[in-house]
Image (spheres, rainbow, N blue to C red):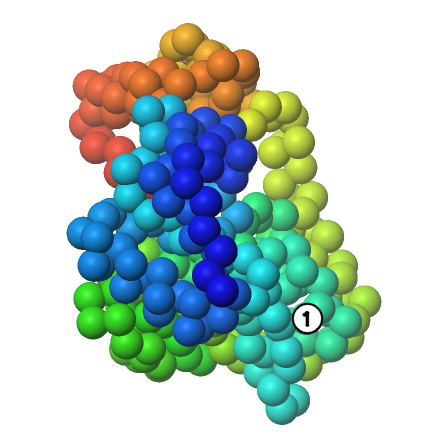
Amino acid sequence: MLRREYGKLLSRHTTLKIGGPVFCWLEPENIGDLLDAIKIAKDTQKDLAIIGGGSNILASEQGFGGIAVYLGRGFDSIEKEGEDVVKVGAGVPLALLVKKAAEWRLAGCEFLAGIPGSFGGALFMNAGARDTEDPETMREVKDIVVDVEVINVKNIKKETLSRKDILFAYRSSGLDGKCVVSGRLKLNKDGREIIENRTRSFIKKREWIEKIGFPSAGSVFKNPDGAATAGRLIEKSGLKGVRVGGAEISKAHANFIVNIGGATSKDVMQLIELAKKKVSEKFGIDLELELKII
């Protein structure tokens, strides 16, 4: 039976720890449940939000008047297919994916080490990182995808999309209007020690995250093309450490907004607008949100 709950607080399921009650929270445990959940949203004409690890989300403390679908148990399987292909459920934590791949002596997904959240969100956002050995090279989910199983929200049909059918771009997959169910990844054989050393190098690169010390939703803005990073632009605009209410532009990294205690979505939005305004005025660059607002 499809598990449901009314009035569940989104603050308990977002890494920023902000978010009021949702009209209806659904927890499908299989594809049939998921199809039913999407159908309920369509039949009731309610907005639909897919929730995984809860990172990269800013939810209003006023609540969400739609239906939130949580992909956890039932979508958290990971299995090896053949010698070098791994099928990963949308609800699989990225840390588990990296760990299992290393156990199977499969390389190629180490760049996901240290990134919070689940596989579905990482695929939807085309998560990535600069290579630790070659900083000019960007490692992204698109580089290892074979195909993706999704539910088309419009017609409530299951589809399998090959890599060439997906319009991947920087921090984007073009999968709007679709719910990621699972994906198959093409990895490559390598020594376990080599893989684990490479994984540690990516984790070390993200050690600064531990210095943040407060709840956050990860990077707020995408890095603009051909320019300094969003964090550097915000820092050079003199905004590092600026606070509004319980929200602060992190002193550890200016592209992170942290909840230092009692922050509201309004506080966060004011900092977002301030950063956009100051960077535009100083550098003539329009920052684009990476954060998803529901």
Out of 218 and 8, give the one closest to the viewer.
Answer: 8
The extreme bottom residue here reads 82
- Disc 1, SS: helix
- Does residue 162 appear left or right of residue 276 in this picture? right
Out of 79 and 47, give the one closest to the viewer.
Answer: 47
The extreme right residue here reads 193
Specify the amino acid type for callout 1. Ala
Q: Residue at x 29, y 59 (%)?
A: 40
Q: Residue at x 37, y 24 (%)?
A: 61
Seen in the picture, residue 248 relative to 223 is either above or below; the reply is above
The extreme front residue here reads 1
Q: Quarter holding the C terminus? A: top left
Q: Position of residue 175 (x, y in %)?
A: 29, 63
Question: In this figure, which residue is indicated by the disc labeled 1?
Answer: 101
Q: Position of residue 102 (x, y in %)?
A: 73, 69
- Does residue 259 appear left or right of residue 192 in this picture? left
Seen in the picture, residue 276 relative to 94 is either above or below; the reply is above
Q: Position of residue 198 (x, y in %)?
A: 70, 59
Q: Residue at x 58, y 61 (%)?
A: 73
